Image: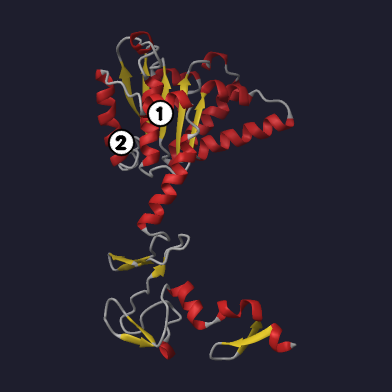
Amino acid sequence: MGETLYKTVGQFDIRVPAHIARLCEPSEADRRNHGIEWADGHTCDDCKKETLISERPFDKKCPHCSKPWPVRCLGTACDALIHYSHANGLWYDPYPYCKPCEESRCADNAQEMLLDIPPGTLIDAIDGWRRAAHRVEAEKESDFWISHDLGRNFGNMTGIYLYGDVGTGKTTIAARYAAKAIKAGCAGSFLWVKEYDLMMAAKATSYDGKKESAALFIRLEQAGLAVIDEMFAVSEALSENAKIMIGQAIAKRFEARLPTIVTSNHEPAWAALYDVRVNSRFNGMFKVMKLNGPDLRQHFGGAA
């Protein structure tokens, strides 16, 4: 009875439950923890010396040169080995996914995040991109912004502020920026919200409403990339509590250097409607782009 329930494994004959015995075998432990499959031994990729099974390195390093063993990709059914990187005299842990698996994960996550953008706006941004002159310039700016890790490698300019008259394409350009950033794998999480939505969330009085409101503002504070569409459209109608909540979320994004895209019909000076601190953060956080031109909805007979 005991033999069927328990088995002995390893060089110390440790008794373990039979159903997990395979996972406790030295070869399986090495496969999971060291990223290698031991037979009689293993040859180090760096020093080319062989390590016998009896010299198995429990510290995950080659006993001859101390180079860390590679680890296996965590992708489903993927056996690729990922090596540690060495720079400035230090070993750095490898990213847990190989490049093909990570690209696949990014693609799946991107499709989920893009669902936050209104469908019609997303179609215009990706498939119906109309080459108005200011949009050509906006395209260049988006490439620059993305190449600098959404502004994080370019001082504090992690924000893009798009303003101009109605129909000049602010929302479409914002969607274009967001979609390109998401597809490039620059955003781990994403939120698309209008100032009106934030105003209504701040007005919630029921228990469920307050719960949803808190969740929305937490997402706004923490999202890897956020778009606030039609900012200052209803600012004059905001309660003091709503101004505090929105201002605090913007402040936290500024302090955490989280990329933010804002569209508005008004100049960024309208941020003073919240308070002087929000106005100061707007000036220090956003690259301001004014969009001139005709109402593209009328010009093209469709969405801008």
Q: Residue drawn at (42%, 45%), measured in percent from left and top?
A: 107
Q: Residues within 10 Å of mark 1 (few under 14, many from 20)?
A: many
Amino acid of disc 2: Trp
Q: Residues within 10 Å of mark 2 (few under 14, many from 20)?
A: many
Label 2 element class: helix
The residue under label 2 is 145
Give the colour scheme of this rendering: secondary structure
**Figure check: 180 above or below 8:** above
Percent of width and height locating residue 212: 65, 33
Residue 167 occupies quadrant: top left
Which of the two marks, 1 or 2, is nearer to us in this view?
1
**Figure check: 170 above or below 65:** above
Regarding residue 210, the answer to whether it shows in the image is: yes
Percent of width and height locating residue 180: 35, 36
Q: Are marks 1 and 2 in contact (CB under 8 Å)?
A: no
Label 1 element class: helix
What is the quadrant of the N terminus in the image?
Answer: bottom right
Regarding residue 161, the answer to whether it shows in the image is: no
- Report, in whole angstroms, how far the alpha carbon at label 1 lies from the one at label 2: 14 Å
The residue under label 1 is 175
Left or right, residue 265 beside residue 275: left
**Figure check: 5 above or below 209:** below
Residue 178 occupies quadrant: top left
Q: Residue drawn at (25%, 25%), measured in percent from left and top?
A: 137
Of residue 278 and residue 88, the one placed in the foreground of this image is 88
Q: Residue drawn at (50%, 77%), measured in percent from left and top?
A: 29
Amino acid of disc 1: Ala
Percent of width and height locating residue 253: 46, 37
Residue 23 occupies quadrant: bottom right
What is the quadrant of the C terminus in the image?
Answer: top left
